Amino acid sequence: PQSRSDRAAKIELWALVSSSFVWACGQWIVAPALPYFAMAKGCHAFHYAMISSAYAASQMISSPILGMLSERIGRRPILLGGLATTSVVYLLMANVTTVFQLLLARATLGFLSGAAAVEVAFVADLTSKTDRVDWVNMQTRLQSAGCLLGPAIGGMVAPYS
């Protein structure tokens, strides 16, 4: 039988790796509607390319920054702060009026998504050496499932928005 602390650790790990799915799904659910939303704001192909690239560039820059910050202040504050801020940025993004505001919103979302590296580090912190590979693999699979299902869900609801 598992001890209470073992069960609590497993629950914490499942919550953590499941948040990878939710985060990835949320990040990509807007993908099918984003080009139309951008065009409604006066966006041209070049602008859209910049908006898409800003997300990836910001994520690439933020991963090491958020990783170092999580070493200093802890993993939980980075992850919880990132989730909360992401929600606020999505609300702001829904109300943008210019292409530049949309670019800024997507760059901010990309920066916040750099916390995915912090999630992996947190999983590593919470697991034993023998279980680590399995849990990191689960986190990666759930994140990939979110990336797969997010656009599918977005594509189903986009015609109604």
Image: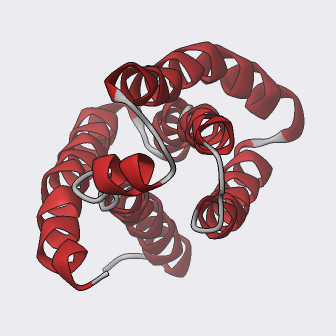
Does residue 61 appear left or right of residue 116 in this picture? right
- Above or below — where is 41 with respect to 160? above
Residue 101 quadrant: top right
Q: Residue 25: x, y in percent?
A: 31, 60
Q: Residue 92: x, y in percent?
A: 69, 63
Residue 58 quadrant: top right
Instruction: Report how many numbered discs are placed on residues in the image.
Output: 0
Does residue 22 appear left or right of residue 159 in this picture? right
Q: Residue 107: x, y in percent?
A: 60, 32
Query: 152 and 24: which one is in front?
Result: 152
Q: Residue at x 44, y 44 (%)?
A: 127
In this figure, which colouring scheme has been used for the structure? secondary structure
Q: Residue at x 16, y 54 (%)?
A: 145
Q: Residue at x 45, y 25 (%)?
A: 47
Q: Quadrant of the C terminus?
A: bottom left
Residue placed furthest toward the front: 42
Does residue 93 appear left or right of residue 159 in this picture? right
Query: 55 and 23: which one is in front?
Result: 55
Query: 115 and 149: which one is in front?
Result: 149
